[in-house]
Amino acid sequence: MRPIKTRATIGDPVQINWLDQESAAISAGFPENMVLLDCETTGGNATRHRIIEIGVIVIEKGQVIDEWQTFCDPGTSIPQNIQQLTGIRPDMLTGAPEFSAIAQRLLEFLDQRTLVAHNARFDYGFLKNEFRRAGISFSTKPLCSVKFSRTLYPQFRRHGLSDIIKRFDLNINNRHRALDDAWMIYRFFQSSSKLFAKDEIAAICKTLLSNPALPPLLPASEIDKLPNSAGVYYFHNEAGELLYIGKSVHIRNRVRSHFTQDHSNPKDMQMSAKVSAVKFQKTPSDFGAQLYESQQIKTLNPLYNRRLRRVKKLFHFRRFEDHHGYHRLKIEALSDCTSESVTGLFRSPRQAVKKLEQLADEHLLCHQLLNLEKTSGGMPQRPCFRSQLQKCLGACCGAEPTADYNQRLALALADYEIKIWPWSSAILVEERDPTDPENCAFHLVDQWCYLTQLDDLNHLYDAGYQPQNAVFSDCNRSLSKALEPLHIPMEAFDLDTYLILVRFLLNAHRRALNNLKVWPLQPAIHPSD
């Protein structure tokens, strides 16, 4: 089965996983209640130097609910180099309160919230000493955004705030000012939320904030052998049975996150008692890890994984116009015909119905025209029940103009149209680990279908393709050094694979972060042709 396609441009920041949409807010994988904090100080020694400015951003459930900034009188002079770095002059602190005067207000912000700072040891050390001078004992477990960056982005060598600002092309007005720098942590978390799944982020935060305890049957050597890089991991019990398959950009951290002592996830608690061995397969990046994990779960059916099955039938929204001119929707199985427009891909009619109900609420769409509410046929004489609740604007009884309703329906469905394949033929996706150039993989993809993984250009020719231009010879030299290929047999079309491919290949920033290169191909020309 090949998907129906609508036009997309390479590099478009599209939102395509309508079954599990990415949020524009901070990911739910971060602590629910956080305080993003930054301090400016008279120097780098927490016991001798003092705080001169504090900036705070309060986050609850991924949303900013408050921000606060204050200068502090350090009771001492500001060194010239600090003035040049921060732009904070002595006259700006005239009349500023001492830390002791704002200590209680700051504690109110910090109470029952996770403290987050960039290079948290620095800021936390200054806070503890300032609170101590004010006669207050302060202790917490901070979340360090530097450590978070190192774990989530191991392909980068530097993780200072200036490096992160450059990495994500963030805009900042006053670098080395407390509130502005705190906002950069927020923007960094926001950017990461768009690039990584909630569970990936949650795993990192969990291990940074807690002390993992190994399962009783799992030797420490099993953890020590795990790499700090991307790939897929496997949990086995003493009998060798496969319990679980997972993926991560940082295998060791992700595995450790399963064994935190809080056991907030019942599945992790059950597995913890049984795991006796961990195996892994490295991939050059998150791209290969996601593809391989999806295939492995469907093939091996581990005990504790959510069951992923290869669906032979997909469902979509078929749009048609009734005799009154209103556009209606009907949920139908997707056939092999590619002549009609397709909107949405769902594993079951139930999933499609759930999505339609959500869109109806968000865009005031009529349940009757969406085929969610049965009618006796024709245009009803009375408004539907939802119109009485002002959740339908009257399209059901002709009260709303057809053009208005049809335009709103089109807007509601815009993000759910299947993306057109932007290349003229198949492509070869080069995936290379920037920290280990020998760790590379080459994926043959066509029309959102994963065909195979290659380790030799002769195999590409045998598959019926050849490069479009000579520059591909650079890849040719690298291809001969590729590692043992991960054999990922795929069916003609797989929904999970489609979502992964679109998520990475149509997002230029995600491609760059994963060091992916796309090589256009063309049908091979044989001597007999």
Image: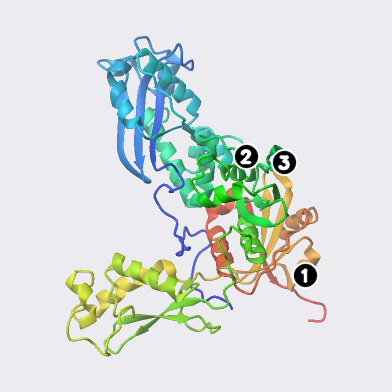
| Residue 295 locus on image (x, y percent) | 64, 63
For image coordinates 60% across by 73% down, the residue present is 493
Quick check: 123 above or below 221? above
In the displayed structure image, the side of residue 395 where residue 451 appears, left or right: right
Q: Of the residues shown, which amino acid type is indicated by label 1? A: Tyr
In this figure, which residue is indicated by the disc labeled 2?
A: 214
For image coordinates 58% across by 40% down, the residue present is 151
Q: Of the residues shown, which amino acid type is indicated by label 3? A: Lys
In this figure, which residue is indicated by the disc labeled 3?
A: 225
| Residue 177 locus on image (x, y percent) | 38, 28
Task: Residue 518: tell me if it is visible.
Answer: no
In the displayed structure image, the side of residue 222 where residue 144 appears, left or right: left
Looking at the image, do the residues carrying marks 2 and 1 touch, with CB atoms under 8 Å apart?
no
Q: Of the residues shown, which amino acid type is indicated by label 2? A: Leu
Q: How dense is the environment of label 3, judged by Cα within 10 Å: few (below 14), some, or many (20 and up)?
A: few
| Residue 297 locus on image (x, y percent) | 63, 62
Task: Looking at the picture, tell me which residue is in the foreground, 348 or 434.
Answer: 348
Quick check: 69 above or below 355? above
User: Which callout, 2 or 1, points at the residue further toward the start of the chain?
Assistant: 2
